[in-house]
Image (tube, helix red, strand yellow):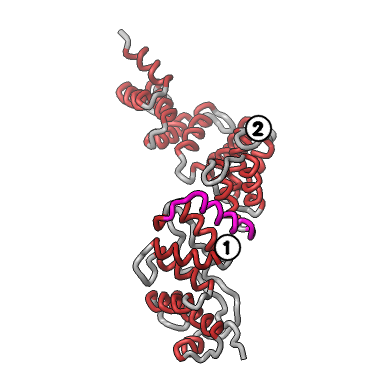
């Protein structure tokens, strides 16, 4: 009699890897029954399952139990051993996990070449996340697999299964003409498919595209719509874009007070651009009572992050003694910092100040 899957849920055992995003937060989540994994371990160790498929599943679940410490003490090496044993039978999910292990150095030495080989095995069986990850490897050159055409092929396979990250990555290749012929229409289609599934990077990309008129015709209302979607998911550049639209009435009714709220939210994520903009609003009294001292604070924070316009504005406050005490030496210092970055206003003012 075929043995039923026994783990109630499998938790994440990796963190997302740097820029590849090939390990997902739900990679180790699987619905099943509420049985303890301990009987599984015994069955796997003794080969109690008569069918190869059942054995492969038991070995895979044993690896999962060791990877998260479910019913046994967590042991990465044992987890890797059981994943690979299961993967050797062709069990697709185990093949993908072995790829994860090699990529992250989980229970074995990190080896991108081996990771790529195991991901390819799973991808060839139609595993969407493996297909996406192979695409990432080919795009980023991991494991000596640099090939944009192959990257596009595997992204397309995952995208055809509805994977939003693959749709976005494939759209990006079309935008840059890498591995495929450049196509704004394909980029827009793929970004939209991913954005409609809630993929924040695609939403942000569409917001920028509609705002700039690059890839798609300029449309401020659609730009505001997609930037808001991305901003609500925490994308900080999109928060700035929403603030800009509200401040200037682009695609939405002008509302400086709401703009100030979005800029303040963006500033909480250590954004020099948001600090600078808040400085301008507090200095001029836009949507808030004029407060040169608060403007000085925001300018100073942004200036220390080499924001040229903030450096110029900070120098001006020092020169005028607004929001701080007058200090010619500090004024010159910050104006020179801005001028060294090519800011013409600072260069011109320095010429006037320093002229005999």
Q: Position of residue 302 (x, y in %)?
A: 42, 35
Write the start and end of the magenta stretch as one range.
145-162
Q: Residue 107: where, in percent of width, then height?
A: 37, 72
Residue at the farthest top position = 356
The residue nearer to you, when weighing 45 against 321, is 45
Q: Residue at x 54, y 58 (%)?
A: 132
Q: Which residue is mark 1?
A: 128
Q: Residue at x 52, y 50 (%)?
A: 149
Q: Tell whether 183 sits left or right of 334.
A: right
Element at label 2? loop
Query: Marks 2 and 1, Cα distance to the nearest angstrom?
Result: 39 Å
User: Where is mark 2, residue-wise?
Assistant: 250
Q: Is residue 354 above or below residue 303?
A: above
Looking at the picture, tell me which residue is in the foreground, 173 or 6: 173
State whether residue 227 appears in this view. Answer: no
Give the residue at x 69% y 37%: 221
Circle 1 residues within 10 Å: few <14, some 14–19, many ≥20: many
Q: Earlier in the sequence, mark 2 or mark 1?
A: 1
Q: Is residue 328 visible to the viewer in this orientation of the structure?
A: yes
């Amino acid at each position: 009699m075929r043995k039923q899957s026994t783990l109630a849920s499998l938790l994440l055992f990796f963190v997302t890897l740097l820029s590849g995003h090939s390990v997902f937060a739900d990679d180790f989540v699987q619905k099943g029954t509420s049985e303890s994994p301990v009987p599984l371990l015994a069955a796997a160790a003794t080969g109690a399952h008569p069918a190869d498929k059942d054995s492969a599943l038991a070995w895979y679940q044993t690896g999962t139990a060791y990877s998260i410490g479910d019913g046994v003490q967590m042991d990465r090496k044992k987890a890797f051993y059981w994943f690979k044993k299961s993967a050797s039978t062709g069990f697709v999910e185990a093949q993908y996990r072995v790829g994860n292990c090699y990529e992250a150095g989980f229970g074995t030495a990190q080896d991108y070449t081996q990771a790529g080989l195991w991901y390819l095995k799973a991808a060839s069986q139609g595993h969407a996340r493996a297909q996406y990850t192979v695409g990432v490897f080919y795009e980023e050159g991991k494991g000596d697999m640099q090939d944009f055409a192959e990257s596009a092929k595997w992204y397309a396979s995952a995208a055809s299964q509805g994977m939003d990250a693959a749709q976005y990555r494939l759209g990006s290749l079309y935008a840059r003409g890498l591995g495929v012929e450049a196509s704004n229409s394909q980029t827009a289609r793929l970004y939209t498919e991913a954005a409609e599934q809630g993929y924040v990077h695609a939403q942000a990309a569409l917001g920028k595209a509609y705002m700039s008129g690059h890839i798609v015709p300029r449309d401020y209302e659609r730009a505001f719509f997609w930037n808001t979607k991305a901003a609500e998911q925490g994308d900080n550049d999109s928060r700035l874009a929403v603030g800009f639209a509200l401040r200037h009435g682009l695609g939405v009714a002008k509302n400086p007070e709401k703009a100030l709220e979005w800029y303040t939210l963006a500033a909480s994520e250590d954004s020099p651009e948001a600090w600078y903009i808040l400085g301008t609003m507090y200095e001029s009294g836009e949507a808030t009572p004029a407060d040169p001292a608060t403007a000085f604070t925001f300018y100073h924070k942004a200036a220390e992050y080499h924001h040229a316009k903030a450096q110029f504005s900070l120098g001006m406050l020092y020169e005028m003694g607004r929001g701080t005490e007058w200090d010619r030496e500090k004024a010159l210092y910050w104006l020179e910092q801005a001028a060294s970055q090519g800011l013409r206003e600072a260069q011109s003012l320095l010429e006037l100040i320093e002229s005999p």
